Image: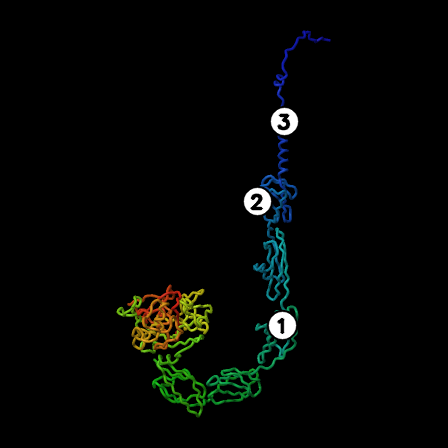
Amino acid sequence: MTDNRDDTPLSAAAFEPLSTQVAQRSLPRWPWLAGSAVLGVLILCLVFLLTARSLQLRINAVGAPTVEIEGLAIALGDRYLIQPGEYLVSVKIDGYRDWQQRVTVTEADSQQIDIQPAILPGPVTITSTPPGARVVLDDNELGVTPLRDLSLEAGSHTLRVSAPRYQTSEQTIAVTGRGIEQTISVALAPNWADITLASEPIGADVYVDDTLYGTSNSTLEVLSGERTLTLKRAGYQDYSVQLTVVAGVPQNLGSITLLPANGVLALRSIPPGASVTVDGEFAGRTPQEIELSPGIDHLIQLSKLGYQRKSFALALDKGAVAERTVALKAELGDIVLSIDPEDAEIIVDGATVGRGSQTLQLAAFEHRLEVRKPGYAPVRQRVTPRPGLEQQVTITLLTEAEARKSALAPQIATVLGQTLVLIDPIAAITNEFTMGASRREPGRRSNEVEHTVRLERAFYLATTETTNAQFRRYLASHDSGQIEGNSLNREHQPVVQVSWQQAARFCNWLSEQEGLTPFYRETQGIINGYNASSTGYRLPTEAEWAYAARVEGQRYRRFGWGDTFPPQKAVVNVADNTSALVTGRILNGYADGHIVSAPVASFPPNHRGLYDIDGNVAEWVHDVYNIPSANAEIATDPLGARSGDNYTVRGASWGLSRLSELRLTFRDYGAAGRDDLGFRVARYAE
């Protein structure tokens, strides 16, 4: 054996520190890193679990849904662990429309969201017995059966199916949707019943509600409802019966015996309109078709006022038609006409018979008599001659102006007791006159421009101003007030403190009380126009007021009492000696006995029977205030503008005393009421 021992002597080794040796040999690091990562994930999971919230998605649908949530969410059945925040949630289910919505997860521990995806339509086929029926679904017409593969929304629908001669079916159907095919079959019930009938003689035509259905001695299918069944056969009278037909319920009417048809007489008379009796029974007036029982003699009589009665006998065969014209002989009477003027035309029953006075022979019945001539009002009346008795008729034509005048009442009264007198300019000496005053007239004001007007329409004007008592019938709460302890509010004093609008509305109210068309147009309580053709109550126009106050024949009055100033006796209520403490200015030396307004009609009327038109209270008139032009064309029945801010005031009052104010041409204006301003009413006569 070989000895391999090393005989080298042992010696001490050099000392090296342990750290130096470790540094020289490096250990691997990945185990430590992997451990750290796992620990971190565990910590994150723990944090997520500790901070996550429970979110339940309750999906109301049939089938397995596919849910996608944007972001980190852990599914636990229909619940999800999810951090608070906003997420996009998507749900897909077969047979439903995709659902998608942004959801906010709050800090609450447990939360719930209800999801209802929209159901997709389903294919539906609709058939009917019989086919070809009309289909209406939810009031929308779809067509006629069969209808295949209709795409209908899921849910309940109202289905109505109808066909001629069948009962309409209406039902509620449930559409499943989700692409599931459905078939709906509708069997319509017949809407008729079998009606069996026979006739004697046989072979009569059968009509139902004027529609030919067939012939008798057969069974007919008649629609349900209230029906009129009529049998017709030549030479026989029609036979009708009312039936109540119930679908599916047959009826047997048995045998119906038809009666022979009447004969028909076409009867006329000269002149027409004669009364006809058959066997003493009234049968109408000629021309007339009269049915007569066949094979029998009938007594037929004709009579007409002013004509001799005539009669004859007649028998007709079954279904025969005859014609007869009977001339009636007139019974005459004499009408002796006395006509003025002599050349006037005479018209009887619409036909001209001559001119002037004459004797007419007319049939003894009522006639329409008219006498006319150009430029004159026609006269129409009725006359009835009497055989053997001469009648005298005297007619005198009036000119149109005379006739119109005679037809108008000289005065009328309102329901409040106000009297209105007729003023007819056409019938007067003059109807064209000058308003305003000459520049040289003492007291003239700049708004009194002279201009010419013409009045042609007759009108009525109240003789007195409207009183407190009369106005309070319209407005019970009205108070005219008082001044310096002097009352303006007594029953028979003229109403004051009334605006123009209130005065116009009073006129409309008065018209309504008498059934007249209101003159003023009113919108929400505001007068904003007028109806010129109305004969309802209104305020007098300025031209009418001036004509009634000033024009006397061919002369013009300067003051209401005449032409002298001041008045010599108590003829008008103005600011007199007793009014000094109230008005501050007076008509020196004049006393009328009233400090403020007097009861209406306390002083003599003017030449037209009008009281207080020159005093007591000033008066609203109809016209919107303006200053007329001296060069304007002559205006006929002027009414002025339809609306404006201010309205014209005419006449003096208890508060005025100056020469300028007491003249009848004095003009003022305003819109609001005052303590010395009232009104009187007027209306057109035609």
Residue at the extreme right: 1
Q: In the image shown, does 71 or 502 lie closer to the viewer? A: 502
Q: Position of residue 322 (x, y in %)?
A: 52, 84
Q: Position of residue 297 (x, y in %)?
A: 56, 88
Query: Mark 3 near mark 1, Cβ–Cβ under 8 Å?
Result: no
Q: Position of residue 187 (x, y in %)?
A: 64, 62
Query: Mark 2 near mark 1, Cβ–Cβ under 8 Å?
Result: no
Say which of marks 3 and 1 sits in front: 3
Q: Is residue 290 visible?
A: yes
137 above or below 57? below
Q: Amino acid at mark 2?
A: Arg
Q: Which residue is mark 2?
A: 102
Quadrant in the picture for residue 85: top right
Q: What separation in Å lies between label 3 and label 2 (alpha carbons)?
A: 43 Å
Residue at the extreme left: 440
Q: What separation in Å lies between label 3 and label 1 (alpha carbons)?
A: 105 Å
Labels in figure, total: 3
Q: In the image shown, does 272 or 597 lie closer to the viewer? A: 597
Q: Is residue 651 visible?
A: no
Q: In the image shown, does 428 or 456 lie closer to the viewer? A: 428
On the picture, is 125 further left or further right than 666? right
Instruction: Please give the label number shown on residue 75.
Output: none
Q: Position of residue 588 (x, y in %)?
A: 32, 71
Quadrant in the picture for residue 241: bottom right
Instruction: Please give the label number shown on residue 32.
Output: 3
Q: Amino acid at mark 1?
A: Thr
Q: Secondary structure at mark 2?
A: strand
Mark 1 crowd level (few <14, some 14–19, many ≥20, 10 Å Cα) = few
Q: Amino acid at mark 3?
A: Trp
Q: Which residue is mark 1?
A: 244
Of labels 3 and 2, earlier in sequence is 3
